[in-house]
Amino acid sequence: MPNQLLRSAIWAPTIALSWFWGLGFFYAIHVTLTYGWLGFLAFALPNAVGLGLFGWVLGAPGRSPDKIAAAIQGPYAVLFLACQFLAVAITIFGFTAYAWTPLFGRDTIIGSIALILIACSIGHAVPLRRIKIWHGVVLILGVCAGFVALAGLAGGSSGPDVPLSSFDQRFYGLVLPSLVGFLLGPWMDVQHWHRAVEIQREGASVRTAYGIGAVLFVGLLTINALLASAAGLGEPVVSFDGLPGAYAAVAQATARSHLAGVTVAFLIWTVVAAATTIDSFYSATRWLMTGITTRSNSPLLAFVPPSLVSSPIWILVAAFATAVVATQLNLSLMYLMVPFATLLVGGAACLVCETLGASRRYDPVLSYMIGLAACLVFLTGYIEPNWAYLTLAPLIGLVGALPMMAELLGFGGKPATPAPIATDEPAAKTVVVAVARDEAVASHGFDGQWFVLNLMPTYDDTNSVGNVYFANYVRWVGKARELFFNTCMPNFDLKSTEFYVLTKSFQHDFRREAAEFEPITVRVRIASHNRKFVTLAHEIHSEINGLLGRGEQSLMFVDTVQYRPLDIPRTIIEGFLPYWPKTSPHATSTVSGPLGATSLSV
């Protein structure tokens, strides 16, 4: 038990620091100076409770964060990536606008870029199990620096004390959005899912780690509240909407002090907070995207290397660009925080409900459209201000999760089992093929997604009894497959190819017999695929006796040197893309046209 407690406690610093981003760091300063100590507590306590509840629920006995994460990574990937994008944008914007620029001016922006690159390098090179040790070390350094800065600012402070409370209509309106956003926030943050999975794998307690981490997080927020109290309001920064903000008050006071020690201490404190968010973002996002691409069956990964798809660089670039735009437009931090209480809460609520056992009824498009409406309502109420609009906004955002919430609370039944998806050729229906005899021997080509070969068996194809020999059916399917390949890839050269196509398996279900001079139609199409295998379905029809049999075969691809299995080659995807199954996300419009004198009717 003591060993498990120690293993759990080691995770607490990285849990607290990963949640101590621009949202917590600078907003703690602003809310303390704007709304007083009770305003700070109204912000800090729900934030910490949401962090602790995440660990408590996910770390419940019998609940596996690893299995849950594997099940929800794909469906909720956009939610996770949006959260990381906003988290990094907030961190970069807050650090640059409210710490670095007040201290050193806009011309030294290169320092912010260097910090981002160094933090991403750590996240790329160091696994999470070692990042937690690194975070424990820098946390000690950061806290010491924070207290040094606090002592320096307190010694020269002459401003009025922070009041117990200074509430207005905007504050009352922000109570419910803050509560909803902070309680759901950790669920949409893939950094915490990554940590919960690793904590359980190490044999530590997720509940204990997050409980200690939540307490430590409140302590970190309190340091910033004390710094704000020592710094005083200073000169509020007025954003484009005309509203003043106290986010940069500590940096302004540090610059006014002209004390090198205070400046260095506050800079170390802010660098620790920003860097430990960015390196965690990089590590967790790569973990998420690697898991998704590893399980993906998309043949498009033959075009783009999976390592490129799973790289967090794209989100980092987008977040940096957003931070630059927000700076140029003179936005306040609030505008980057709004989505956590409006746009994303529907998806986050669905995720919580699914973790607790509700059936998945998550419709991301619907949730985001409702979330955008909630976002507009929030912004309208924030600028005016109007407490009713602010209070209503998060409730609107939760509408998309109502079916799952109702089920979880016992007010809604299980969703109806969806009806089976109809196939192109239902087995219960008989396919009648009418073939013009004078063209039946040689005609072949595509009819929609089916490749059709028409042929006429002769005495050479029969056995001693007089019906067609069973092996000829397999041979006909093989001939249709080769003509299918030749039509799609007319330039394929066996002498110069870098891959071979091998038959992994073949299955055929015989239904009826055929005789000589009985027009036959063999139909082949792509039935399904994943990253390595393609399944071809086939049917054999007689003009006289109808369906003779059907089956399928599985194809694989190997290199021509070591016969090593390959993902579906790019040239295969390019040649066969028009004929992927209709349910495939990679299908294009079907190529169809007349097939000689052949006609198919169902």
Image: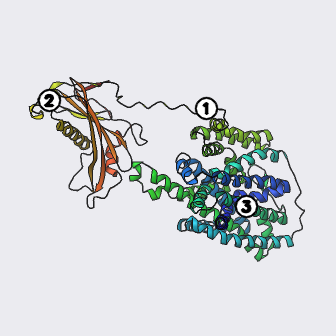
The mark closer to the camera, 1 or 3, is: 1
The image quarter containing residue 378 is top right
- Residue 481 higher or lower than 248, as above or below: above
Front-most of 47 and 145?
A: 47
Residue pointed to by mark 3: 217
Of the 4 image quadrants, the one containing the N terminus is bottom right
Q: Image quadrant of residue 88?
A: bottom right
Which residue, as the protein is rendered here, is positioned at the far front? 1
Q: Are marks 3 and 2 in contact (CB under 8 Å)?
A: no
Residue behind mark 2: 467
The local secondary structure at tag 2 comes to loop
> Hey, which quadrant is residue 464 in on the image?
top left
* Residue depicted at 72% across the width and 43% down the height: 379
Left or right, residue 186 beside residue 522? right
Instruction: Tell me: residue 572, above or below residue 256.
Output: above
**Amino acid type shown at disc 1:** Gly
| Residue 41 coordinates in the image, percent (x, y) | 81, 55
From the image, tell me which residue sits under label 1: 413
Upstream in the sequence, badge 3 or badge 2?
A: 3
